[in-house]
Image (cartoon, rainbow, N blue to C red):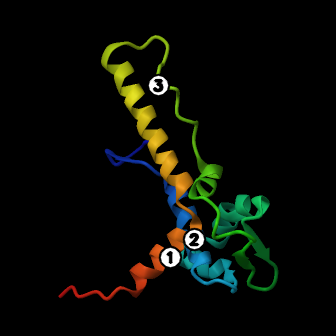
Amino acid sequence: MLVKLNEDFKILTHRQRKAIRAVAEIGSTPGSDQSAAELAGLLGLSRESVHQLLAPYVRMGLLVAVRGRTGGYRAGPNFLETPLAAVLAPFAGPSPSSGVVPGRAGLDRLLDTLEAEAAGARLAVYQRLTVGELVRRLRAEREALDWEI
C-alpha cells in the first residue's frame, strides 16, 4: 500500500512506523519494562496515544501491559520470533488487489498490476523479517562508531 505524503510516496503509514519503532524499543531492553511515558517521549506521542498504539499488540499477546503508577509494556512470549508483518497488520489498510480492476484498461491496468506485485514483494519481506532481527539491527546501528566529522 503506497501512501502519498507531501507529494512523496511512502510505503508504510505514519502509524505503522510508530508501531515498529515502539516494538523495537521494547525489544531492545529484554527482561525489563518500558514505561508508557518513556515510549511517549521516544515516539513523540502522548501517553494515551502510546496506549492506543500498543493495545492491539497486548490483545494479540505480543506485549504484556504492566500495571502500576507509571504503567508500561514488556515483551510477551515469542516476542522476538514474531514476523514484522504481524506488527504491521493492526494498522494495515485494505489488502492489495489482485492487480486487475474492472473497468480499467491500458496503462492504468498495467500500473495496478505492477503495484500489486510490488505489494506482494514487500509483504514477503515483512513476513520473513522478525522483530528479533529488527532489534539486532537496531542494536548494531546504535553500537556502531560514527566517524563523521
Is residue 92 at least partly visible in the picture?
yes
The Cα–Cα distance between marks 2 and 3, rounded to whole angstroms, is: 33 Å
* Residue 82 drawn above or below residue 101: below
**Residue 10, labelled with which disc?**
none
Location of mark 3 (residue): 99
Mark 1 or 3, nearer chain start: 3
Amino acid carrying mark 3 in the image: Gly
Q: Which residue is mark 1?
A: 136
Tag shown at residue 132:
2
CB contact under 8 Å: marks 1 and 3: no
Q: Quadrant of residue 4?
A: top left
Residue at 55% from the left image edge and 78% from the top image edge: 41
Residue 110: percent from the left, percent from the top? 35, 22
Task: Mark 1 and mark 2 in contact? Answer it, CB < 8 Å.
Answer: yes
- As helix, strand or loop, the secondary structure at mark 2 comes to helix
| On screen, residue 81 above or below 11 | below
Q: Nearer the viewer, mark 1 or mark 3?
A: 1
Q: Amino acid at mark 1?
A: Arg
- Front tag of 2 and 3: 2
Image quarter of residue 75? bottom right
Q: Residues within 10 Å of mark 2 (few under 14, many from 20)?
A: some
